[in-house]
Amino acid sequence: MTVTGDRLGAANGRLVATQTLGNHFLGAPLAGLLVGIATTAVFGTAALLYAAGALLLLGMRGRFRPEAAPAQALRADIADGMRHLWGHRALRSLAAYSGVLNLAYGAYFAVFVLWVVGDGSRVGLTPGQYGLLAATLAAGAVAGSVLSGSLTRLTGENGALVGVTLLNALLLLVPLLLPSPLVVFPAAAGIGAANAVTNVVSVSLRQRLIPEGLLGRVNATCRLIGMGAMPLGAASAGLLATLAGLSAVFWSACVLSLLAAALILRGGEAGGPARGHRGAASRE
């Protein structure tokens, strides 16, 4: 509602980049500093930051309201969201894509630390070096968020999703095939960037394709599928690693990423703007 359809990708990219910077580079160091002063300062600062966020929202110009919809029971709202998602081929493929990809990520990073940290691990990083590796992932995510708009202008949304997901499938195997810090760190930056691009493009596509009056209901269903897959992936990784070893988890994550790319290809082009969605633009 705040930007035109042709700027959705760039706007979402900036939002994801800002969230990544705040979560990974500013919030945690600030918490460490505040704990050194007084433990209660962490909670007080968080409360002040929430208040500041509310004030910033109050300063936004305009009245942002969805199209009026008849009041109905919560169960009916949920059914409407699921019905629209299932009836829209591109959205259905996009939701399945997010679920499969998050299943892969949930499994991969549930056991990743066991592969790269400690004397008995394959990569042999220290806990401090693992912190740097996590920061490298976050830095890659910031870069991917900022560059996602330029990438989609070159390839289109479907092309960006397929290309980045295929690249990501290969990067997930780097720590397995080349367990050296000199190689793992650049691969981590690439994985972070790929994850950010898929997030930005997927969210922008949903916002453009879902009618405004159904956005909340359909988006809730999509997020349930996508976010719900992550704990399932983590639990599955623990079981698979116990039965077949850590390398089996990495190979499985790679295969799931390839499957996710196939789902986007099978879903076809994302199509034009959703009917009734203000500011939507046709696909580039």
Image (cartoon, grey):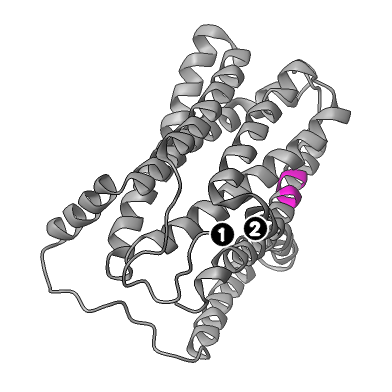
> Quick one: 228 or 169, which is closer to the camera?
169
- Asked if residue 74 is among those painted magenta in the image, a careful observer would answer no
Query: Left or right: where does residue 77 sit relative to residue 228?
Result: left
Q: Are marks 1 and 2 in contact (CB under 8 Å)?
A: yes
158 lies above or below 28 = above
Mark 2 lies on a secondary structure that is helix
Q: Amino acid at mark 1?
A: Glu
The answer to whether residue 230 of the structure is visible from this angle is: no
From what the image shows, is residue 12 above or below residue 48?
A: above
Picture layout, residue 7 above or below residue 193: below
User: Which range of residues does the magenta coloring cover?
Assistant: 136-140
Tell me the crowding category of disc 1: few under 14, some 14 to 19, or many 20 or more residues within 10 angstroms, Cα based.
few
Rendered residue at 54%/79% (across/down) = 53
Find disc 1 in the rendering and name its residue: 284
User: Which of the two labelled residues, at mark 1 and mark 2, occupies the earlier sequence position?
Assistant: 2
Screen quadrant of the C terminus: bottom right
Depth check: 139 or 277 in front? Answer: 277
Q: Is residue 214 left or right of residue 166?
A: left
Residue to which mark 2 is pinned? 153
Picture coordinates of residue 94, whole percent (x, y): 42, 44
Q: CA distance from mark 1 to mark 2?
A: 7 Å
Q: Residue at x 27, y 78 (%)?
A: 67
